[in-house]
Image (cartoon, rainbow, N blue to C red):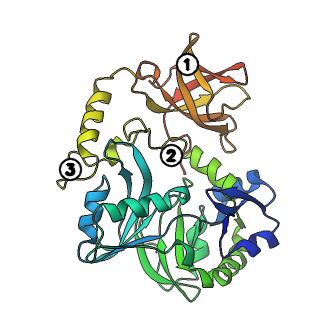
Amino acid sequence: MDQVTALREEHEALGARMTSFAGWLMPLHYGSQLSEHRAVREAAGLFDLSHMGTVWVSGPRAAALLDHAVVGSISTLEVGQAKYTLLCTPEGGIVDDLIVYRVGPERFLTVPNAANTAAVVQALRERGAGPDAEVQDATGSTTLLAVQGPRAAEILAGLVPEPLTDLRYYRARTTTVAGHEVLLARTGYTGEDGFEVLLPAEEAVELWRTLLSVGRGAGLVPAGLAARDSLRLEAAMPLYGHELGLDVDPFTAGLGGVVGLRRKTADFVGRAALERLRAAHEVREPGRRVLVGLAGSGRRAAREGSAVLREGREVGVVTSGLPSPTLGHPIALAVLDPDVAAVGTEVEADVRGSREPFTVVERPFYRRP
């Protein structure tokens, strides 16, 4: 049976179409994915992200544990700073991509993807947890909300005691929102400015209702997983199970810059394998594909699993694709052979037996003004 968030009844009262996702019952949309997508691009959307993991790492050796466990340097983070990173297997595959927040000198929050929370907790514990580095899964007792869009700061400004102008991107602080003590972070997954709000699950309903009430005049609407997916794809952000996975290395996924092979002095799980994989990608070893963006000039969108062809030869596969609500044409992420991955290369995608024209383009597809 699917787990439910503290806001399930709120979603149902708002007419949400609920769906099973990564073991959770979540709102897919509240009537129109398109209107929710556009609201986030033009005003703001409110998301329930409580299916995402909430995993705390605390203690004198917490930083050392995370330095060993993930590919980025965590011990160098300042208190209040966040970092996007990867947890990899010893062979270089991706267990999960996650954000790590340093909320105190010896206390860190990691936010894994919903389907991978258990795997991340297990990996962290196996990689050095103990009395001096405790790993605690608090997902079930925590609510994570997101207010995303160009009017997000305006909506929250009257509910927090300090100015939001000094909370920079990928920074977080403990504060209050409408009287609720929260961890407030300027992070998101939509390509827009926005904030993520972590608070105890028992306080979620009251804050959810307050945000919707206060934000209504600024165009804030509740938004579901469908809009979240179309927004993240326009921003070319990878999704685990599509662009990322145990059989995908960071260099294939275009995340080589996240891996601390040159800057990070501490050893970490997968380092030796990732050194070899980086070299293999640099010399374009056969079979090493790369992630690219594709823009379609036809009407039909390529979907996950669609073959990509060049002059009749299969040269890759689509990992995510849909019609872009903002841009008005199909877009896709795909892994292609390096010799056809240059921007401007024309290819075709097999869409249910029909060859649809696409061109390799720069990522992201959409950048906020």
The CA distance from mark 1 to mark 2 is 23 Å
Q: Secondary structure at mark 3?
A: loop
Nearest the viewer among 85 and 19 is: 19
Question: Image height check: is 178 above or below 352?
Answer: below
**Residue shown at 69% from the left, 62% from the top:** 26
Q: Secondary structure at mark 1?
A: strand
Q: Name the quarter where the N terminus is drawn.
A: bottom right
Among numbered discs 1 and 2, the one appearing first in the sequence: 2
Q: Which amino acid type is shown beneath numbered disc 3?
A: Arg
Question: Image height check: is 100 above or below 334?
Answer: below
Q: Which amino acid type is shown beneath numbered disc 1?
A: Glu
Label 1: how many residues lie within 10 Å, few (<14), some (14-19) or many (20+)?
some
Pointer 2 residue? 238
**Residue shown at 30% from the left, 58% from the top:** 69
Among numbered discs 3 and 2, the one appearing first in the sequence: 2
Q: Could you say which quadrant of the image residue 15 lies in?
A: bottom right
Pointer 3 residue? 263
Asked whether residue 142 is in view, the answer is no
> Residue extending furthest top?
311
- Decide if residue 141 is on the left or right side of residue 272: right
Question: Image height check: is 289 above or below 260?
Answer: above
Among numbered discs 1 and 3, the one appearing first in the sequence: 3
The x, y position of residue 271, in whole percent, is 25, 46
Q: Nearer the viewer, mark 1 or mark 3?
A: 3
**Residue shown at 44% from the left, 38% from the top:** 247
